[in-house]
Amino acid sequence: MSILALPHAQPDVILIDWHATLVNTHDAMYHAVDDVLPHLQELGLLERLLTAEQSKTVEDAKLVKYVRDHRRLHPKVVAARKISRTDIFEVLFGDDEDAKRRAHQAFDRAYRQHVGEVTPLEADARLQLTKLRELGIALGLISNRSREFMTLEVDRVEQGGWSDLFDVMVCGDDVARRKPSPDMLLAALEQLGRAPSEACWYLGDSTTDVIAARSAGLTSLFYNGAGWDQAWLDKIFPGTERHPWRPHAVVPDLSALVALARHLRAQGLRVTRHRDQ
């Protein structure tokens, strides 16, 4: 699983995660998580935290234990800014869909108090997205965030300058199940009139994004904007029987995504022209 690995199919659709893939909303997100965790007991979630044996990694087990003991994230986790609330809830509750649903609902109530400034993660993000559109690729925006907040945040990026970039947007409260369920990705493709296939790429920064893409039968690209090294990537995507999901490729930034899309599309065009001759 290297940065240079190639997907199996050229893209005609690219769906992209929002937080920590396209934009920075870390402050508001962590404030909202901080508001939720002290209330795990009254939410009926404290006893539904995973045990150490159920955790995927030793690091996950330590995070769960700290939350159980202190009702907050460890300061080092917050300072690192490398894990999303979706992955936090996955680490805490695993496959317990009802527990995650309650946690996401509590998060939404808290996030309303903190939603604020939204800035692109990469200075030339709009340029790179425009390049993808110029290749004839349909773009979709995917987020576990509720539509109420997504509408606000998209409008706030570069003073509304991103509102024309996406052909479809699917939010967490548009479907019955949030990521890592594939429901959001399948809903986006349905709106675009496309069937699930490896010609649809999904780019996201979390393990839940990879699981959602692979479960939907799409090409999964992991956005490594956090700069994880190969040893850590192998740890969070172990490829075991219990945790089999791994991305098809890893990209460090949006320009690499554009280069990958151009390369695959050029290869496809060459194959088509050769067959036609």
Image (spheres, grey):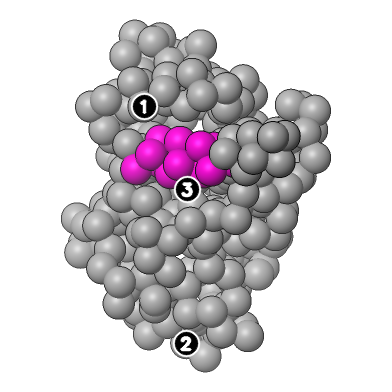
Q: Nearer the viewer, residue 83 or 66?
A: 83
Residues tagged 2 and 1 counted as in contact (Cβ below 8 A): no
Q: Earlier in the sequence, mark 2 or mark 3?
A: 2
Q: Does 179 sit above or below residue 233?
A: above
Residue 266 sits inside the magenta stretch: yes
Q: Is residue 228 above or below residue 61?
A: above
Mark 2 falls on what kind of element? helix
Residue 259 visible to an observer of this rendering: yes
Quarter of the figure with the N terminus: bottom left
Q: Residues within 10 Å of mark 1 (few under 14, many from 20)?
A: some
Q: Which residue is mark 3?
A: 204
Amino acid marked by disc 3: Gly
Between disc 2 and disc 1, the foreground one is 1
- Could you say which is closer to the camera, residue 160 or residue 223? 223
Q: Is residue 114 above or below residue 82?
A: above
Relative to 125, 44 lies left or right: right
Q: Residue at x 38, y 85 (%)?
A: 58
Task: Name the residue: 36% across, 21% down.
Answer: 126
Magenta region, mostly helix, strand or loop? helix
User: Closest to the observer: 118 or 42?
Assistant: 118
Q: Nearer the viewer, mark 2 or mark 3?
A: 3
Classed neighbour count for the residue bearing mark 2: other residues with Cα under 10 Å, few (<14), some (14–19), many (≥20): some
Identity, as a three-letter code, of the amino acid under mark 1:
Gln
Which residue position holds label 2?
52
Q: Position of residue 159 (x, y in %)?
A: 34, 9
The residue that mark 1 highlights is: 128
Q: Which residues are magenta?
A: 256-268
Task: Identify the residue shown where x is 37% and y is 70%.
Answer: 233
Q: CA distance from mark 1 to mark 3?
A: 16 Å
